[in-house]
C-alpha cells in the first residue's frame, strides 16, 4: 500500500495485475515468499487453501498494518475470526470463499462445478480444471482487484474479492491431436480475434514415420491374408525374407525360429496339409550337421561274463573248447566260422556270447528268438547297450518298447545334442499305440519349453495338435506361435509374432476355408489398432471387417467385449474405406453391411 514502508511486506500494485494474470500458478507475492512460516513451526499458517492465504495476506488490512515485532500468528487468528463472522451470511447454503457477489444475498445456490470436481477427487489441480470449466467462481473481475479500502468493507454484506486464476499457458502455443484417419492435426498459435487467420495443418502419420522400423515392418507384411487378390506365393516370399533378415542361424534359437518359418512355407506349399515324413525331412534338412554317434562294446555284465572271464577270452589266448589259439586279428569269416563251431558242440550260450562280443547281432538275435523269451530279452538289452545314449536309434527302440524315450526327458541340453533327429524318428516311425506317440512328443515339447527353447517347444506342440490358448491362462501351452505367454504382454504380442500367427491361420484356411482361430481374433484387433496408429487406416479397416465377419458367423454375444471394440474402431475408420471413392457423393454416408449387422448384434446383446 502507499505509504507503507515494511520491506518484508511489499505487495504488488494495481497495475501489476495485468501481468499477474499470465503467470504460472506457482507465482506467489513477495510478502508470502519472504515470510512463509507465520508461526515458525506452521508453514503456510492454518489455512490449507492457497487462495484463502492470498486473500488474508494480500487484502486484509489488519495483517497489512501489523508491526514487525508483533506476533503475526495471533494477528492472523483474530483476523480470521473477524472475517468468518463477517462473511458468515455468504456461506449459508454451502458457499465457499470464492463466491461471487450474487451469493451475498444469502439465497442458496449449488456449489460451483469446479469445486465439485475438485472435492470429488477427479483432479488433483484446481488450476488445471479452471481452464476447461467456467463458472461464477472462475471469472476474472478487474473491479475486484486493486487497492483495498475501508469504505469497500462498510457492511457485513460486502462480497469477497474473487482470486485471480492464472492461465495454464503463459504464451500462445501449438495444439496437436491425432485423427482417426491416420493424420496428425496441428492447430497453429494464431489469434483470429486480433485479425490473424486461423491455421490448421493436417499431416500424414505414414509420411512422418516413413523411416521407422515399426512402419517398415507393417508395410512389408501382405496382410490381411484373407483377401481374394492374395496369392500364397507372396506369403511364402515373406517367410523367406524373415528367415534371411531376422534369424541368426549361428545360434540355437535362431535355427529354431527359422524352422518355424520353414514349416509355414511347407504348409503354404501343400495347402495346409502334411505328413510325418514331410516334417522329418524338414527337420533333418535344417540340421546344421549330422552328428556321429559313437558305438561301444556291450557291458560285460550284460553278456554274463566277469571282467576276468572277459579278458581270458580276448584274442591270443588258448580256446579251451576248440583247443586252438585264435588269431589276434580275426576276419568276419573267421568270426562266423567260430560261431558255427560252437553250435557244433551244442554250446548255444557261448555262441551267443561270441556273437554279441563280435557284434554279430543278427546271428545273436535270431538264435535267441528261437530260445526262451528271457534269453531273447537279454540279447536285446545287450544290443541296445552298444548304442550311445543320445543315439536316435535308442529313442526309436525305447518308443517301440512301449516307453517314453529318454530323449523326450533330456533334450534341449548342450551335452545331450540336437533334439531334431529324435523328433524326426518319432514322427516317421509311429508305433501302434498312438497315445504313446502323442505323449512322447508333448513331453519333449514340455522339456524344451522348460529350458527356454520356446520355438522348438511350439514346433513339437504343432506336431501333437495342441490347441492354442489365451494369454491369461498360464496353464495353456501356446497362445501365439513362437512366443511365450509367461512374459510381459508387450514382449509377448510383438508385431512379428502376430504376423507369423496370421500366416499359420491362413495355412489352415487353405485346407478348410471356413476355419479360424478364435483366440487369435483379439490379436488381429490389436494389430489393426497398430496399423491405424502408424497411418494405415484402410488396411486396419480391412482387419476389422475380417474380425467382424468371423464373429457374425459365430455368435457375437459370446464375445461381447471383442465385438464392441471392433465396432468402435471400425466406426472411426469407416471413412477410410477405398470403396467410398467409387460411390456417388450421396451414397458416401452409407455404412458397410457388416458394420450395421455388428452394431445390431451389440445392441441386442446390451438389451438382453
Image (cartoon, rainbow, N blue to C red):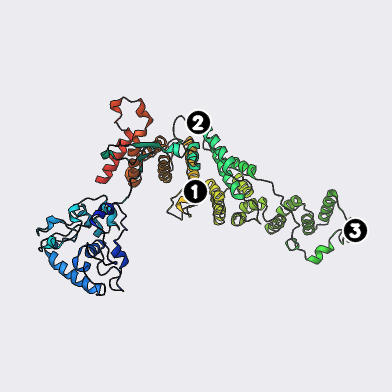
Residue nearer the viewer, 288 or 556: 288
CA separation in Å, label 3 and label 1: 62 Å
Residue beneath disc 2: 231
Q: Residue 432: x and y, percent? A: 57, 48
Residue assigned mark 1: 466
Mark 2–mark 1 CB contact (< 8 Å): no
Q: Is residue 545 visible?
A: no
Mark 2 to mark 1 CA distance (whole Å)? 28 Å
Packing grade of label 2 (10 A; few <14, some 14-19, many >=20) is few
Q: Position of residue 154 (x, y in %)?
A: 10, 63
Identify the secondary structure beneath mark 1. loop
Could you classify mark 3 by the number of other residues whose Cα lies within 10 Å: few (under 14), some (14-19), or many (20 or more)?
Answer: few
Q: Examine the rendering and report whether any part of residue 543 can be seen.
A: yes
Q: Which residue is denoted by mark 3 in the rendering?
A: 325
Residue lying furthest front in this view?
Answer: 3
Residue at the spot 26% in from the left edge and 55% down from the top edge: 16
Q: Who's the residue at 70% across and 55% down the image?
A: 388
* Residue 528 image label: none
Marks 3, 2: nearer the viewer = 2
> In the shown orientation, is residue 49 left or right of residue 409?
left
Q: Earlier in the sequence, mark 3 or mark 1?
A: 3
Q: Cβ–Cβ below 8 Å for labels 3 and 2?
A: no
Residue 327 on image: x %, y %: 89, 55
Q: Earlier in the sequence, mark 3 or mark 2?
A: 2
Q: Nearer the viewer, residue 364 or 82?
A: 82
Q: Nearer the viewer, mark 3 or mark 1?
A: 1
Crowding at label 1, few (<14), some or many (≥20) Cα neighbours within 10 Å?
some
Q: Is residue 49 left or right of residue 352?
A: left
Given this view, does label 2 or label 1 mark the residue nearer the observer? Answer: 2
Farthest right residue in view? 324
Amino acid at each position: 500500500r502507499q505509504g507503507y514502508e515494511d520491506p518484508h511486506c511489499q505487495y504488488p500494485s494495481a497495475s501489476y495485475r495485468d501481468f499477474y494474470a499470465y503467470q504460472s500458478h506457482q507465482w506467489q507475492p513477495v510478502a508470502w515468499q519472504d515470510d512463509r512460516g507465520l508461526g515458525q513451526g506452521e508453514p503456510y499458517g492454518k489455512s490449507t487453501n492457497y487462495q484463502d492465504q492470498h486473500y488474508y495476506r494480500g487484502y486484509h488490512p489488519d495483517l497489512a498494518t501489523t508491526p514487525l515485532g508483533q506476533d503475526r500468528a495471533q494477528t492472523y487468528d483474530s483476523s480470521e475470526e473477524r472475517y468468518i463472522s463477517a462473511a458468515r451470511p455468504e456461506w449459508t447454503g454451502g458457499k465457499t470463499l470464492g463466491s461471487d457477489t450474487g451469493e451475498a444475498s444469502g439465497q442458496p445456490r449449488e456449489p460451483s462445478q469446479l469445486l465439485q470436481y475438485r472435492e470429488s477427487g477427479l483432479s488433483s489441480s484446481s488450476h488445471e480444471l479452471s481452464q476447461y470449466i467456467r463458472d461464477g467462481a472462475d471469472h476474472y473481475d478487474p473491479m475486484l482487484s486493486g487497492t483495498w479500502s475501508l469504505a469497500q468493507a462498510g457492511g457485513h454484506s460486502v462480497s469477497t474479492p474473487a482470486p485471480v486464476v492464472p492461465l495454464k499457458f503463459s504464451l500462445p502455443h501449438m495444439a496437436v491431436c491425432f485423427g482417426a484417419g491416420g493424420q496428425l492435426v496441428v492447430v497453429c498459435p494464431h489469434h483470429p480475434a486480433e485479425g490473424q487467420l486461423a491455421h490448421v495443418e493436417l499431416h500424414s502419420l505414414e509420411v512422418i514415420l516413413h523411416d521407422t522400423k515399426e512402419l517398415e515392418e507393417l508395410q512389408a507384411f501382405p496382410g490381411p491374408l484373407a483377401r481374394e487378390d492374395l496369392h500364397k506365393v507372396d506369403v511364402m516370399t515373406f517367410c523367406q525374407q524373415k528367415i534371411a533378415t531376422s534369424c541368426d542361424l549361428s545360434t540355437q534359437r535362431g535355427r529354431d525360429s527359422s524352422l518355424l518359418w520353414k514349416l509355414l512355407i511347407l504348409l503354404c506349399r501343400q495347402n495346409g496339409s502334411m505328413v510325418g515324413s514331410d516334417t522329418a525331412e524338414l527337420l533333418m534338412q535344417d540340421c546344421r550337421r549330422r552328428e556321429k554317434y559313437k558305438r561301444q562294446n556291450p557291458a560285460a555284465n550284460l553278456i554274463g561274463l566277469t571282467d576276468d572271464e572277459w579278458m581270458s577270452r580276448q584274442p591270443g589266448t588258448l580256446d579251451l573248447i576248440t583247443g586252438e589259439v585264435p588269431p589276434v586279428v580275426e576276419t568276419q569269416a573267421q568270426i562266423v566260422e567260430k560261431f558255427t563251431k560252437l553250435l557244433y558242440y551244442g554250446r548255444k550260450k557261448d555262441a551267443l556270447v561270441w556273437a554279441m562280443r563280435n557284434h554279430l547281432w543278427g546271428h545273436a538275435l535270431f538264435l535267441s528268438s528261437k530260445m526262451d523269451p528271457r534269453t531273447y530279452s537279454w540279447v536285446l538289452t545287450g544290443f541296445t547297450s552298444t548304442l550311445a545314449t543320445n543315439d536316435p536309434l535308442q529313442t526309436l527302440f525305447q518308443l517301440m518298447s512301449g516307453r517314453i524315450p529318454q530323449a523326450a526327458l533330456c533334450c534341449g541340453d548342450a551335452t545331450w545334442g540336437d533334439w531334431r533327429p529324435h523328433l524326426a524318428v518319432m514322427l516317421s516311425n509311429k508305433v501302434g499305440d498312438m497315445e504313446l506317440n502323442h505323449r512322447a512328443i508333448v513331453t519333449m515339447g514340455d522339456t524344451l519349453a522348460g529350458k527356454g527353447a520356446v520355438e522348438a517347444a511350439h514346433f513339437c506342440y504343432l506336431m501333437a495338435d495342441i490347441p492354442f490358448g489365451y494369454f491369461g491362462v498360464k496353464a495353456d501351452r501356446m497362445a501365439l506361435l513362437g512366443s511365450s505367454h509367461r512374459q510381459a504382454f508387450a514382449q509377448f504380442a510383438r508385431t512379428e509374432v502376430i504376423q507369423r500367427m496370421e500366416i499359420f491361420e491362413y495355412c489352415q484356411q487353405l485346407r478348410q476355408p471356413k476355419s479360424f482361430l478364435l483366440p487369435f481374433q483379439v490379436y488381429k484387433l490389436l494389430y489393426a489398432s497398430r496399423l491405424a496408429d502408424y497411418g494405415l487406416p484402410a488396411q486396419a479397416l480391412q482387419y476389422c471387417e475380417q474380425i467382424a465377419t468371423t464373429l457374425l458367423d459365430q455368435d457375437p454375444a459370446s464375445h461381447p467385449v471383442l465385438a464392441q471394440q471392433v465396432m468402435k474402431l471400425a466406426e472411426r475408420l469407416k471413412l477410410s474405406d477405398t470403396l467410398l471413392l467409387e460411390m456417388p457423393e450421396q451414397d458416401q454416408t452409407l455404412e458397410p453391411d457388416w458394420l450395421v449387422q455388428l452394431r445390431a448384434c451389440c445392441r441386442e446383446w446390451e438389451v438382453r
